[in-house]
């Protein structure tokens, strides 16, 4: 009896010592060594390498101040804990360069501090699914940043704090690198940011991405592309781009530049319900064919298209807009849809390409010198082409839908990207004498999308009713900016998947195996196991001798 009591006491003491040791190790790791261990498969509770590299570039102290109303309605009441844990990771990765201050606005003095920091109360709307109640409350959820002589602010942290790492890291990067310019080619009736994308400046400012836009006019090839821009966007030119200008663009690429081309093989005029198409005169193929990409003079009509409400002569009706191929996230390698592994369309559920033209890819030319070729977008196999000069009638397309798509011969590539040691489009015949190809140290990047209206405000107005929140086309534009700027840090943050894991599709064969395995297999296995155990017991009893 005494031995049992002694054993119990020793066991209890051992367990207590083990618990204390684990607690002390955790305190030492978090408070002193700033070490954390994230055991989740996708690193949900740790920072991406891009964020760590950005924090490593801090040359002075960065102060983050959070003005937060305590006891917010559920489920937003858990956001404070999530944000605290994430900011603790920032502090640990900053090597002493980052300080976080929390101001809980639970009295008048602290509320005045928040207002002095230009923070304002905003309405927070929450829905508690557990109690089936909706709540409205005016709260502070404001974050301010102070670094050197610059200040930034997140006026309101969205419920769920999803995407906060990208937002915070973007602000830190903006404060370190205040100017990152993206150029837009002009001079050929292209869509300029001010006219075609009037929403862009507001979105860039609200998202704290640190990008500015600048128009680039090459003046017939007399001017070079400035070396201080991070990338060049060519969006929907309708007039001819002269060869000397194309050579300037080629030289820019060969020296490690990044170019995104959004242009169709046809010029679209008229209304969306009765558009007229004529062969485009932009002359971009004189450049792109040298890289192995050709924009064809056609428009792709996709049976799997989006719906849009449009004003037509007979009144207001809901008609399928065949000229708007809606490319959803690709499920199979090489299948229809967008390749969401590519940074330009990373993790987007889909993108709508208005009046898009097909692309012809010369894979031999495109993959020279190890250049990486990616088919970013491909229409469904129920796609047809309308070539060169034609007129589309939305009502006629609706009435003849089955006939038109009955003999579909798709699918068609409509977006492609090249990255690496891209071969010069004018090799051996360029007065600028650029390298014969881009180098490994300074790789070129080229994105070609067969539509010049992907981001145009008029098209987004038609697309917006189909999507909730910011249109995915606009999100794609922000992705393209990151890709053009060759910003590995922000791309690494975007590449981090913090979404809820999706269930994988189960084949019918597996479903049947699981069904009959549960009905017959498991009972049979239990029965066999019982027989084996009974046999073993019977054998042991037979071996017992008195």
Image: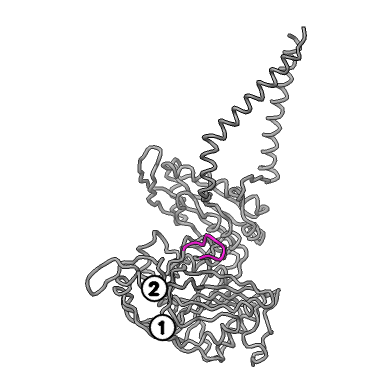
Pointer 1: what residue?
267
Which image quarter: residue 200? bottom left
Query: Would residue 148 appear left or right of 205 to someone viewing this image?
Result: right
Per the picture, the main secondary structure of the magenta-coloured stretch is loop
Asked if residue 340 lies in the magenta stretch, the reply is no
Q: Residues within 10 Å of mark 2 (few under 14, many from 20)?
A: many
- In the image, is residue 334 above or below residue 63? below
Query: Would residue 546 appear left or right of 371 to someone viewing this image?
Result: right
Residue at 22%, 70% (x, y): give it. Answer: 315
| Foreground of the two, 258 or 321 | 321
Quadrant location, the C terminus: top right
The image shows residue 356 at horizontal and vertical percentages of 44, 75
Query: Would residue 543 appear left or right of 323 to someone viewing this image?
Result: right
Pointer 2: what residue?
323
The magenta-colored residue range is: 328-335
The image shows residue 226 at horizontal and vertical percentages of 58, 82
Which image quarter: residue 401? bottom left
N-terminal of the two: label 2 or label 1? 1
Give the number of callouts: 2
Q: Secondary structure at mark 1?
A: strand
| Foreground of the two, 238 or 30 | 238
Query: Would residue 466 appear left or right of 170 to someone viewing this image?
Result: left
Quadrant location, the N terminus: top right
Q: Secondary structure at mark 2?
A: strand
Q: How is the image coloured?
A: one colour
Residue at 63%, 88% (x, y): give it. Answer: 426
Can residue 421 be seen in this snapshot?
A: yes
Can residue 457 be seen in this snapshot?
A: no
The image shows residue 171 at horizontal and vertical percentages of 55, 61
């Amino acid at each position: 009896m005494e031995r049992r009591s002694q054993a119990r006491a020793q066991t209890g003491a051992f367990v207590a010592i083990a618990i204390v040791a684990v607690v002390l190790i955790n305190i030492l790791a978090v408070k002193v060594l700033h070490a954390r261990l994230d055991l989740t498969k996708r690193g949900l509770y740790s920072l991406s390498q891009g964020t760590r590299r950005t924090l490593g570039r801090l040359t002075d102290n960065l102060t983050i101040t959070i003005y937060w109303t305590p006891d917010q309605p559920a489920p937003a009441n858990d956001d404070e804990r999530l944000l605290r844990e994430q900011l603790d990771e920032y502090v640990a990765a900053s090597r002493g360069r980052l300080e976080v201050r929390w101001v809980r606005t639970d009295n008048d003095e602290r509320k005045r501090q928040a207002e002095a920091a230009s923070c304002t109360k905003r309405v927070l709307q929450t829905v508690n699914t557990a109690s089936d109640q909706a709540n409205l409350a005016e709260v502070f959820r404001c974050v301010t940043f102070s670094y050197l002589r610059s200040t930034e602010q997140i006026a309101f942290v969205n419920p769920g704090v999803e995407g906060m790492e990208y937002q915070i890291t973007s602000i830190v990067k903006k404060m370190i690198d205040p100017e990152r310019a993206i150029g837009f080619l002009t001079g050929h009736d292209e869509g300029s940011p001010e006219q075609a994308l009037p929403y862009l400046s507001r979105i860039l400012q609200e998202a704290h991405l640190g990008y500015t836009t600048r128009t680039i006019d090459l003046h017939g090839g007399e001017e070079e592309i400035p070396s201080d821009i991070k990338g060049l966007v060519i969006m929907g030119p309708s007039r001819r781009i002269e060869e000397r200008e194309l050579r300037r663009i080629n030289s820019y690429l060969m020296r490690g530049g990044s170019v995104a081309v959004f242009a169709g093989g046809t010029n679209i005029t008229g209304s969306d319900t009765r558009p007229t198409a004529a062969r485009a005169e932009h002359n971009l193929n004189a450049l792109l064919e040298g890289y192995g990409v050709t924009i064809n003079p056609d428009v792709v009509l996709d049976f799997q298209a989006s719906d849009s409400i449009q004003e037509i002569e007979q009144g207001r009706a809901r008609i399928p807009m065949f000229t708007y191929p809606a490319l959803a996230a690709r499920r199979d390698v090489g299948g229809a849809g967008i390749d969401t592994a590519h940074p330009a369309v990373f993790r987007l559920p889909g993108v709508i390409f208005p009046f898009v033209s097909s692309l012809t890819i010369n894979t031999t030319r495109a993959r020279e010198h190890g250049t990486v070729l990616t088919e970013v977008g491909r229409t469904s196999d129920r796609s047809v082409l309308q070539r060169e000069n034609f007129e589309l009638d939305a009502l006629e397309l609706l009435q003849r839908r089955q006939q038109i798509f009955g003999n579909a011969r798709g699918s068609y590539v409509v977006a492609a990207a090249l990255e690496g040691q891209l071969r010069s489009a004018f090799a051996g015949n360029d007065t600028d004498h650029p390298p014969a190809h881009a180098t490994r140290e300074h790789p070129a990047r080229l994105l070609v999308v067969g539509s010049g209206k992907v981001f145009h405000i008029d098209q987004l107005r038609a697309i917006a009713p189909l999507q909730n929140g910011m249109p995915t086309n606009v999100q794609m534009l922000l992705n393209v900016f990151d890709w053009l700027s060759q910003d590995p840090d922000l791309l690494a943050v975007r590449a981090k998947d913090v979404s809820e894991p999706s269930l994988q599709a189960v084949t019918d064969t597996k479903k049947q195996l699981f069904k009959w395995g549960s009905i017959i297999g498991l009972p049979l296995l239990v029965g066999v196991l019982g027989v084996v155990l009974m046999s073993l017991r019977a054998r042991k009893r037979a071996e017992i001798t008195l």
